Image (cartoon, rainbow, N blue to C red):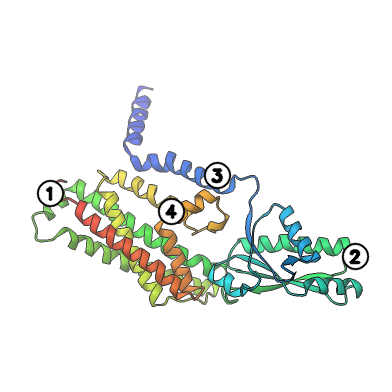
């Protein structure tokens, strides 16, 4: 029994000394609980829904449009936002990346009254403008559809007086996998660059490689530049494999363009610099994995890679806007899916600025002689 106790004590000491094991066993599950709990623990999830009421008389909503809007509010399922009737709804939805927008057209009240008089031989239609690549749009549509069906049932026990017309704002050739892939590409660039930078630096510290490099003509910025180019190449390789896999298995139609290719390079630059900054405060390889995970995992779940940011609580949405991976994922989607080069270029500019800054800081604080 004494041997068992001795072995058990040795195992416990090994566990305590292994920071990576502690992270995966204790910290990582807690991180998941906190993140998913904050996202899904609300008693009632509300969805964003813009409503454009074009059917107004003297600036006031007509009876039918007013009734629909009132019922939508009573469901307590939406964060509703009224849209100016003079704005082109489709263009607004595309520009602002809306998941769902309901349009009540001009003459809707008259059409509804006519449908009642003709016993359903004519119908009054509302238009549901949506992005079919988001996960929230089908949920919103089902709620709106149930409201319309309830109207029809109460008025005539099922005769269709009111109906919904669908209008997609993302090209029909795109599906959810096309929307999902750019986020995964950005996430891969992040994990590849940060983990490589942190793990390599920690290993070089432990093995005394930095001491030897300090005696060579190799400059710190040259070494970091070499690591950055390596991470960019690996990120491109991962991007190519994922796109090829998506084309072969899911019949994807998207392809990288010059903006998205440059965005991936700048993302690798930025995350490599961030990895070097993190590595400065890591003393051993065991702590490297834990430190890298502590940075990458929150960004994975809070940057809209797996879940639409609009479905998160407001305080998490605010945090998401501060995370660099959000700009990478949104920029890649703007370039590869939505065909919005201006938005993609803006996001690329932000990432490029952060990348240059992180590389400069990483080069300055990496001290081979002191390690």
- Are there few (<14), some (14-19), or many (20+) residues within 10 Å of tag 3? few
As drawn, the label of residue 369 is 1
Q: Quadrant of residue 274?
A: bottom left
Tell me the SS state at disc 1: loop
Residue lying furthest top: 2
Question: Sequence-wise, which precedes: disc 1 or disc 2?
Answer: 2
| Residue at (18, 63) in percent of width and height | 222
Q: Is residue 192 visible?
A: yes
Spot occupied by residue 316 in the image (x, y as percentages of width and height): 50, 50
Question: For the residues carrying marks 2 and 4, which lies nearer the camera in this image?
Answer: 2
| Residue at (33, 26) in percent of width and height | 6
Q: Disc 2 marks which residue?
A: 156
In whole angstroms, how far apart are the C-alphas of marks 3 and 2? Answer: 43 Å
Q: Going by the image, does 166 lie left or right of 306?
A: right
Tell me the SS state at disc 3: helix
Q: Disc 4 marks which residue?
A: 299
Q: Going by the image, does 193 lie left or right of 80?
A: left
Question: For the residues carrying marks 3 and 2, which lies nearer the camera in this image?
Answer: 2
In whole angstroms, how far apart are the C-alphas of marks 1 and 3? Answer: 45 Å
């Amino acid at each position: 029994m004494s041997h068992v106790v001795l072995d058990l004590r040795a195992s416990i000491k090994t566990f305590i000394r292994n920071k990576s094991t502690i992270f995966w066993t204790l910290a990582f599950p807690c991180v998941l609980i906190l993140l998913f709990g904050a996202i899904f623990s609300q008693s009632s999830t509300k969805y964003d829904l813009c409503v454009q009421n074009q059917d107004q008389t003297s600036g006031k909503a007509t009876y039918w449009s007013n009734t629909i809007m009132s019922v939508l509010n009573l469901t307590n399922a939406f964060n509703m936002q009224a849209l100016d009737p003079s704005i082109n709804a489709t263009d607004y939805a595309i520009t602002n990346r809306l998941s769902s927008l309901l349009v009540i057209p001009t003459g809707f009240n008259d059409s509804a009254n006519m449908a009642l008089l003709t016993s359903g031989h004519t119908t009054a239609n509302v238009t549901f403008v949506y992005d079919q690549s988001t996960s929230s749009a089908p949920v919103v549509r089902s709620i709106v559809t149930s409201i319309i069906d309830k109207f029809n049932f109460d008025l005539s026990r099922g005769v269709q007086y009111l109906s919904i017309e669908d209008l997609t704002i993302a090209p029909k050739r795109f599906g959810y996998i096309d929307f999902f892939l750019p986020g995964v590409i950005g996430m891969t660039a992040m994990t590849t660059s940060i983990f490589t930078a942190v793990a390599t630096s920690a290993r070089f510290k432990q093995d005394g490689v930095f001491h030897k490099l300090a005696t060579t003509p190799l400059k710190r910025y040259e070494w970091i530049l070499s690591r950055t180019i390596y991470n960019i190449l690996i990120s491109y390789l991962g991007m190519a494999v994922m796109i090829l896999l998506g084309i072969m298995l899911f019949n994807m139609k998207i392809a990288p363009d010059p903006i998205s290719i440059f965005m991936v390079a700048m993302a690798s630059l930025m995350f490599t610099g961030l990895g070097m900054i993190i590595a400065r405060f890591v003393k051993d390889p065991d702590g490297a994995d834990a430190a890298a995970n502590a940075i990458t995992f929150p960004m994975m779940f809070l940057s809209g890679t797996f879940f639409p940011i609009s479905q998160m609580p407001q305080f998490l949405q605010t945090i998401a806007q501060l995370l660099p991976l959000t700009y990478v994922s949104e920029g890649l989607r703007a370039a590869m899916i939505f065909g919005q080069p201006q938005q993609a270029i803006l996001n690329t500019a932000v990432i490029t600025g952060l990348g240059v800054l992180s590389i400069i800081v990483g080069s300055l604080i990496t001290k081979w002689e002191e390690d």
